[in-house]
Image (cartoon, rainbow, N blue to C red):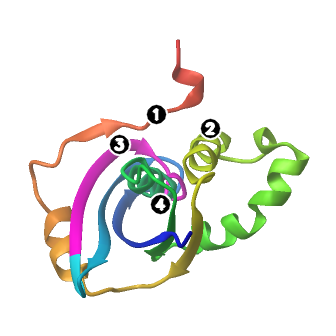
Amino acid sequence: MQLQKIDVYIEQIYSGNFKNGEGRFSVVLEVMKDGKPITREHYRGYKGTTKNRLPLLACIEALKHIKKACEIEIHIDSPYMVASTRLLDGWVKEGLEKHKNADLWKKYLDLAEQHLITISQEKRNEYSPAMRVQLGMKELCMIEDFREENEF
């Protein structure tokens, strides 16, 4: 059985220092049907996050909306995501908890398990102009970044 192909486009902006700032991301999920793209958009903002957690949070947000097994290509301008996903199998073998952002990597792995995922580093895509407008919207609610250690 051939898996459905979904392209995920992610744009992000981050401000603050590397270890503690705020960031926003916009996600577009695209499926082709009868030669035409069908898209769904999601966006979110986090405060109290890091520059490396933000793209991981964006990928998790995208994967949460894909309910059946698919072939997914994630288009994102994040060297961290590209490099880290190449190392992820090794991290799991040696103990994921030894690595930064282990809480989010666990969530990512749970959501990614059923899919065939590739990640491409891209600065711009066809949706970038509209996504940049969305990221600048003042009414985007900023929420506190989830941290595993903050759970009750």
Work out how far the residue at label 1 is from the one at label 2, CA to CA, in angstroms.
9 Å
Work out how far the residue at label 1 is from the one at label 3, CA to CA, in angstroms.
10 Å
Mark 1–mark 4 CB contact (< 8 Å):
no
Amino acid marked by disc 2? Asp
Of 60 and 30, nearer the camera is 30
Mark nearest the camera among 3 and 2 is: 2
Q: Position of residue 4 (x, y in %)?
A: 44, 70
Work out how far the residue at label 1 is from the one at label 4, CA to CA, in angstroms.
14 Å
Magenta range is 38-53
Residue hosting label 1: 146
Q: Residue at x 46, y 58 (%)?
A: 59
Relative horizontal placement of residue 134, taking residue 25 as reference (left or right)? left
Relative horizontal placement of residue 12, taking residue 90 as reference (left or right)? left
SS label for mark 2: helix
Work out how far the residue at label 3 is from the one at label 4, CA to CA, in angstroms.
14 Å
Q: Tell me which label, 1 or 2, sits earlier in the chain.
A: 2
Residue hosting label 4: 55
Residue hosting label 3: 47
SS label for mark 3: strand
Neighbour tally class for label 3: few under 14, some 14-19, many 20 plus, Cα within 10 Å:
many
Q: Tell me which label, 2 or 4, sits earlier in the chain.
A: 4
Of 7 and 75, nearer the camera is 7
SS label for mark 4: helix
Q: Residue at x 80, y 58 (%)?
A: 89
Of 59 and 36, nearer the camera is 36
Residue hosting label 2: 103
Q: Position of residue 134 (x, y in %)?
A: 15, 64
